[in-house]
Amino acid sequence: MLKSIVYLNADLAATIALRYACQLATLTGMEINILHVEPPDTEDHPPGSGWVRRTWEKGLISQATEQIGQVIAMEKDRCPTLAPPKILLGQPQTGILRELRESDYDLFITGLLHSFSSQHFYKELHSKFYQQIPCPILMVKNPVELKRAVILMDPDETGTAQARTFTRLFKATGVAVDLITCEFGRAGKAGPEHVDETALSVGAMAPEEPVAQTHAILKEGGCLPETVMHLAGLPKVVGDRLAGYQLVLVSLPHHIGQSSPLLDCLSRVPSALLFCRRS
Amino acid sequence: MKILLALDDNPYSATAVNEVRALAVNTWANVTFLGLEAKPGDSASGPAGGPSLRTALNGYVEQFMSAFPTGDSPYGDTGEFQDGTGSDNGRCSCRGAEDGRKQLIKHLRSGDPAKAVLTEVLEDPSDLIVIGCDPPSQGQGWPGHPTAPQRIVNEAPCSVMVVKRAARIDRIVCCLDGDAVTQASLELINQLLTIHGAGLTLVGFTGSSGALKADVENRLVNILNYYRALGIEPLVESVDIASLDSFTSQDRPGEMLALWMGPQTLLGKWLPKRKVNRLVTESQATVLILR
């Protein structure tokens, strides 16, 4: 059984992430663990040491447990198997990374509200935190019903990480998948607001070509893609074209520059993004 | 609910009638058909030699009533405008027989269309004004009175829907703003979702940090839960209030933009009249201003 961990706060973005995770658990049977890391109030230094400090920490954890418990209670009907949350005290990113390293999780799930501006999305993905997460990261922006996913890949780079993650998660679940290669360098032939779509024939490709390799992994895993195509257009327009998918799987780049057409494109996707690790 | 439907004899008015007809089928709203003409007895905005506004108004009512099976209409007999129908305080009125459970009134006013609509709504308050208008790709507001829709949006004391001709609506984008959201406006959105089979996006405004304020977030959660209980799963989007201008002015094919506006609302402060004017004029899609 796949083991996932949801980072939960008492806010809207995290609630959305938990709802999406519950849907995945129902579809795939994966185990959901819940983690919350309560940051100590920065204005109040820890009071003293010994039992005074322990009592203060207990108070913070008790308060957080109650708040997170209320969020979980709202989702209990949809996901009755939710286990009690793990509540830690400290800096959230440090606590999450420690937990991910100590236990062997297959998937880290977090929420980020879909935003009109890509600035916030960029800021998140530029942080060292995302680069240090050792497993695939599912970033949920909206609690959409998962029916169709897409594996997005650069035409010249392999999409095997996405294909392996998809087959591992969704084999025999009935979730449809498409395989799309993207080129962001130019506008569509019909104008900047258009995307050029070209169907790709995998049979006509050499087996070592990245698309053929990715396709083969999906086929072997029993998740034959329904559509294989190439999209060319400006990043935001391609992103809008992907809005019909409820999950987009991409490879998390090792280095993200100040300007990234891929991130521009992904910032427009309103549903969920699954960042896979290249082996 | 009471709807004031502002009409001339251009094709966009027929689209507005269709919108109100669909709303009325679900809500049995009281409806006033207000025909607007530049000079008494003359439809200056219509095509030369075209039907008079009175005939057009009778036709709109017929179009509206076609949604209700004969003998099973909540509006009863609607009556017809005849030449020489009497004038009362600048307004020609025609009421149907008093056998309807709901009210359907036809009025004609002449003169400046925006002024006529605002006078009508002051004399006989409505919850919603619906007005048709050409999208920028097909024309310019109201022929002869291009700024009429904007003036109505800016000055009306109630909600206003500006319906664009042949507008297909796949998604309604609702910009939430603090406590201005009322139950009645949520129900109106709910009706529009049903009528168009559209999806819903709820937009919350943020500061430069990208985080929603606690009260906006709570409001968003409550509204999200309200729609979920109705079986509607909205999308959520956050918008930095500083990007509001580019957000509202972007091209949104198939989307209806719904904004809660008022002097006390954040949107009311950030969207001055000229921006609202531009929004109403330049949007290809239907715009709904909620008050």
Image: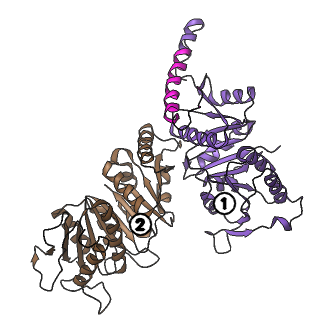
Chain colours: A purple, B brown
Q: Are marks 2 and 1 in contact (CB under 8 Å)?
A: no
On screen, residue B278 versus residue A3, left or right, reads left
For mark 2, name the chain. B
Residue depicted at 75% across the width and 44% down the height: A168
**x, y percentage for residue A231?**
71, 65
The local crowd at label 1, few if under 14, some if 14 to 19, many if 20 or more residues have their Cα within 10 Å, is many
> What secondary structure is the stretch in magenta mostly built from?
helix
From mark 2 to mark 1, how far is it between C-alphas? 27 Å
Of the pair A119 and A198, the residue shown nearer to us: A198
Horizontal side, residue B66 vs residue A14: left or right: left
Q: Chain of mark 1?
A: A
In the displayed structure, A226 sits above or below B177; it is below
> In the rendered image, which quarter is residue B61 located in?
bottom left
Which residue is painted at 51% across and 27% down in the image?
Answer: A69
Q: Can you tell which of label 2 and label 1 is closer to the viewer?
A: 2
Quadrant location of the N terminus of chain A in the rendered image: top right
At label 2, counting other C-alpha atoms closer than 10 Å, the crowd grade (few under 14, some 14-19, many 20 or more) is many
**Residue at image mark 1:** A235
User: Is A83 one of the magenta-colored residues?
Assistant: yes
Magenta span: A57-84
Tell me, yes or no, if residue B263 can be seen here: no
Q: Position of residue A61 (x, y in %)?
A: 55, 20
Q: Position of residue A215 (x, y in %)?
A: 80, 57
Magenta stretch: residue A61 in it? yes
* Residue found at x 35% / y 61%: B273
**Residue at the top extreme?**
A51
Q: Which residue is mark 2?
A: B286
